[in-house]
Amino acid sequence: MSGRTEVERCNLRGVQGTRVVDGEESLMCLAVPGQVIELVDPERSIARVDVAGVRRNVNVGLLEQDGQGAVPGDWVLVHVGFALSKVDEEEAQATLRLLRAMGDAFEQEIEDLRRSLIE
């Protein structure tokens, strides 16, 4: 992905938003909730995760740091191919509703994810 702008990277991997830091607006990428379907390679910490109907392999190794790990049925926040944290189903569904309300921006992100191959 080298050579791409920060905006292009966010468009490829996550729904983008903006934040204000010290009075200046800056770009940020948002993590998207997904549900762990199965562990496909436990040795490499790879799980199959369903993100808004799109199933992709995601690295869940960061979740193992707290001793909990990921198991099928868990809801996780996914950003650039990594599960960053677990969330409960209620929070995941609320976040998905909010993201869907973004309309075309969210739908384009899901379509980009659908066309991508993350192995």
Image: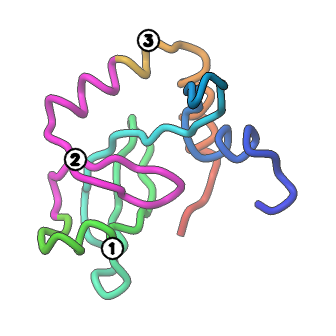
> In terms of sequence position, does the residue under pointer 2 or pointer 3 come before the other?
2
On the question of residue 17 being in view, the answer is: no
> In terms of sequence position, does the residue under pointer 3 or pointer 1 come before the other?
1
Would you place residue 101 above or below residue 2 in this image? above
For the point 40% across and 50% down, the residue is 78
The residue under label 2 is 75
Image coords of residue 8 (percent x, y): 76, 41
Snapshot quadrant of residue 60: bottom left
Label placed on residue 101? 3
For the point 35% across and 61% down, the residue is 48
Q: Which residues are magenta?
A: 71-97
Q: Is residue 75 magenta?
A: yes
Image coords of residue 41 (percent x, y): 33, 80
Label placed on residue 61? 1
Dot 1: within a 10 Å radius of its alpha carbon, few (fewer than 14), some, or many (20 or more) residues?
some
For the point 44% across and 43% down, the residue is 54
Q: Distance from label 3 to label 1 (Cα)? A: 31 Å
Amino acid type, callout 1: Gly
